[in-house]
């Protein structure tokens, strides 16, 4: 089973790119982030025509996540527990039946948090703490689980083109990386690093200053696996090709192959 994640950076602007990539790559499950539209404005019929079941947790003009699955959803729950006043659309949790049992998918768009020292950074760290609490609770089910999405976290110096330039950025601050490591310490596996140890493999290139052409990127989109999912991991790859297409997202898809 192929499971992909992609920050699409506006589904209306990238619908052609999304359709092209889905036809080419044909993932069984695709987690999309930053769709930037309300539920009713999401182009679900186009994806349903490709054979996907669609669930959307949108927000007009900002944020928003969507799940596409060739298998039916057994259940889908929006919103991350822990803060009833949080109205930002950044989280979906789904259970999908597979031949071996069930697969749980968490589709996340973690806050950017810049600038550090602001309320936005406080929100980012609090959101990460809430995510950790939720994942810890779900790990007790001892089932294959994947946390997929745009984490807005650069885990290590080898995941950014110029670490010194990012030391004070919310994506690379010590507190951010410590929170990400605390999540991994629950027993999760970074799928990409389980399959690749080479540096300079990125999922994001800014639109400015020729970042794509110079390969000045960041690895901030991740697939984290529970022990039961990690045992079934066969491959994990980044597909940089859509970044070179016309009107691209600044992120590219990353996907895993999982035995189910």
Image (cartoon, rainbow, N blue to C red):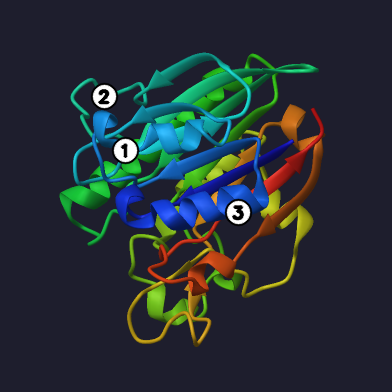
Element type at mark 2? loop
Say which mark, if any, is on residue 254.
3
State which quadrant residue 205 falls in. bottom left
Q: Position of residue 23 (x, y in %)?
A: 61, 49
Element type at mark 3? strand
Q: Residue at x 56, y 28 (%)?
A: 105
- Whichever of labels 1 and 2 marks the residue nearer the N terminus, that label is 2
- Whichever of labels 1 and 3 marks the residue nearer the N terminus, that label is 1
> Considering only vertical position in the picture, is 193 above or below 69?
below
State which quadrant residue 114 falls in. bottom left
Disc 1 designates what residue?
126
- Labelled pair 3, 2 in contact (Cβ < 8 Å): no
Q: Nearer the viewer, mark 1 or mark 2?
A: 2
- Labelled pair 1, 2 in contact (Cβ < 8 Å): yes
Query: For this view, does 66 lie left or right of residue 99?
Result: left
Placement of the C terminus among the 4 image quadrants? top right
Q: CA distance from mark 1 to mark 2?
A: 9 Å
Q: Residue at x 31, y 38 (%)?
A: 126
| Residue 129 is at least partly visible in this image | no
Placement of the N terminus among the 4 image quadrants? top right
Q: Position of residue 101 (x, y in %)?
A: 75, 14
Element type at mark 1? helix
Q: Position of residue 156 (x, y in %)?
A: 56, 64
State the residue in front, 68 or 232.
Answer: 68
What crowding class fits label 2: few (fewer than 14 Cα within 10 Å), some (14-19), or many (20 or more)?
few
Q: Position of residue 240 (x, y in %)?
A: 59, 67
Disc 2 designates what residue?
83
Q: CA distance from mark 3 to mark 2?
A: 29 Å
């Amino acid at each position: 089973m192929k499971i992909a994640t992609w920050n699409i950076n506006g589904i209306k602007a990238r619908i052609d790119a999304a359709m092209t990539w889905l036809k080419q790559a044909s993932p069984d499950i695709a987690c999309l982030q930053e769709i930037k539209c309300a539920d009713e404005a999401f182009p679900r019929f186009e994806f349903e025509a490709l054979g996907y079941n669609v669930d959307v947790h949108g927000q007009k003009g900002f944020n928003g996540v969507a799940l596409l699955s060739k298998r039916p959803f057994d259940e889908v729950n929006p919103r991350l527990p822990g803060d009833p006043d949080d109205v930002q659309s950044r989280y979906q949790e789904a259970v999908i039946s597979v031949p071996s049992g069930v697969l749980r998918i968490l589709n996340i768009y973690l806050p950017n948090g810049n600038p550090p020292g602001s309320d936005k950074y406080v929100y980012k760290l609090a959101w990460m703490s809430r995510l950790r609490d939720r994942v810890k609770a779900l790990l007790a089910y001892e089932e294959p689980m994947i946390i997929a999405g745009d984490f807005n976290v650069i885990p290590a110096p080898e995941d950014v083109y110029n670490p010194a330039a990012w030391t004070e950025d919310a994506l690379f601050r010590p507190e951010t990386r410590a929170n990400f490591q605390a999540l991994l310490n629950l027993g999760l596996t970074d799928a990409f690093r389980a399959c690749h140890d080479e540096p300079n493999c990125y999922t994001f290139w800014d639109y400015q200053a020729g970042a794509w052409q110079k390969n000045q990127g960041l690895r901030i989109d991740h697939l984290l696996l529970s022990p039961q999912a990690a045992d079934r991991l066969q491959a994990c790859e980044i597909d940089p090709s859509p970044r070179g297409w016309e009107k691209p997202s600044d992120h590219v898809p990353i996907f895993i192959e999982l035995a189910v």
